[in-house]
Image: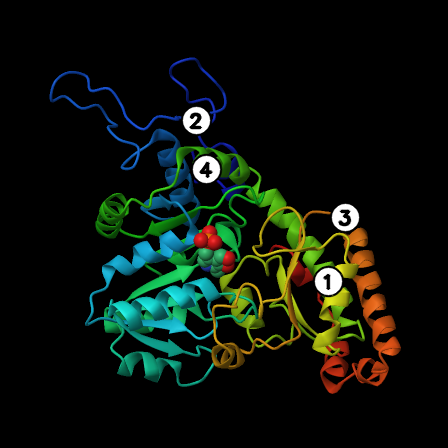
Amino acid sequence: MSKRHAATIAARAGIAQDTAFAAVTPPLYLTSTYELKAFQQPGQYDYSRSNNPTRDLLAETLAELEGGVKAIVTSTGMSACLLALQLLTPDDTLVIPHDCYGGSYRLFTNLAQRKNAFKLLVVNFQQADWAEQVSAAQAKMIWLETPSNPLLQITDVRAVCQLAKQLQALVVVDNTFLSPILQQPLALGADIVVHSTTKYINGHSDIVGGVLICNSKQLGDELKWWANCLGITGAPFDCYMTLRGLRTLEPRLRLQQDNTSKVVAFLSQQPLVAKVYYPGLPDHPGHAIAKAQQRGFGAMCSFDLAADAALLPVFFSALRLFTLAQSLGGIESLICHPGSMTHASMDAQAQQTAGIGPTLIRLSVGIENADDLLADLQQAFNAVAQAGQQAGNHGKADSAVTQDHQQQQQFRLNPALSAFW
Ligand SMILES: Cc1ncc(COP(=O)(O)O)c(C=O)c1O
């Protein structure tokens, strides 16, 4: 059979393969241990921290979806990140982007500063001299997150991988924001992909999990050894739930992305929005690279509210559909304030350097009806405008039609480019 499409791989994972009872849906193996065939004759499985059939099925499916050789399913996205770092020693240099997920930033900086686990260089991959900086540091591992969280900045994965080959450095890409449906970093030259499966891969905000996928058996075997050694492999029940969510990944993302292009178009014309961050916008600095390396622009977007930060509570409490919560990638629409939530573990200086301002708001757009989502946002903007007037600072709200906003008005989403291509 020819190579299967992603939607088919995800939907058919383990279907109609049960040899015991011909169950169509693969069973959940809730066992910690397995009976030996006889004394000193172990079977395929011995202990579920090391291996479990439900976890293995999820790992094989995710490896196939990412085009990798081996996947290791972990307990959380953070444990997948921690696992990749086992490849480093104290003399090695890890390069990270200045605007990565706050929890990853906390892990990298604390392991480097408090444990001497490796040397750390924080680089802004949007600046022209990124390659010089990475080369000068003789990087051993380069960490990428593209699109980045929460500003959706795009890094050219092919260009970084080319340099990494010269330096004999490993490239790890956190692909959480897009999933293998919209981006396959291994095909762009990366060595390792990590995901918080908590997000799009599971898609229903009801478990936490992670995965690390390698482009070689050697790397995969070493990391699998570490995952068992550290005891960070994923729980079988969580793997079962993730497999169940994964089956609908492609249609979910298609709908979420479609809704996002409508939300972005709406925000781009909203007077109380100073700036919209979405790689699907033609004037987004990473638009061309995103088009070249992604299969869609994704379902995350951010914006700066053009009002005093004191009015943020009014905006958030007026919303009825967008739920104020951490996390992203579920079927329900979520909204968050990165400065005080997802990126609170970055200090004020790091947030400022990363461009995370006090009125930055991030949306994870779900599968609800798009008109209902837009109406929800509109009534929250109305509440802010009203509160601004009452507080006597409506001048600030009026000045929301700033230069930034006028620039936003000059372009529109190109619907032809907003969905899959
Ligand atoms: C891009 C990214 N990577 C990694 C993580 C960590 O994943 P988890 O929360 O599953 O540990 C997150 C969590 O928000 C994330 O957004």
Q: Residues within 10 Å of mark 4 (few under 14, many from 20)?
A: many
- What residue sits right under mark 4 in the picture? 238
Q: Is mark 2 within 8 Å of ligand 1?
A: no
Estimate the x, y position of residue 356 in percent, counting from the top left: 57, 75
Give the spatial CA distance, label 1 vs label 4.
Answer: 31 Å
Q: Is mark 4 within 8 Å of ligand 1?
A: no
Which amino acid does the dot numbered 3 rest on? Asn
The coloring applied to the image is: rainbow
Instruction: Identify the residue at image location x=76%, y=85%.
Output: 402
Mark in the foreground, 1 or 4: 1
- What residue sits right under mark 1 in the picture? 316
Upstream in sequence: badge 3 or badge 1: 1
Q: Residues within 10 Å of mark 1 (few under 14, many from 20)?
A: many
Upstream in sequence: badge 3 or badge 4: 4
Upstream in sequence: badge 3 or badge 2: 2
Q: Is residue 402 above or below residue 283?
A: below
- What residue sits right under mark 3 in the picture? 369
Give the spatial CA distance, label 2 vs label 4.
Answer: 10 Å
Instruction: Identify the residue at image location x=40%, y=78%.
Output: 123
Residue 101: tell me if it is visible: no
Q: Nearer the viewer, residue 48 or 123?
A: 48
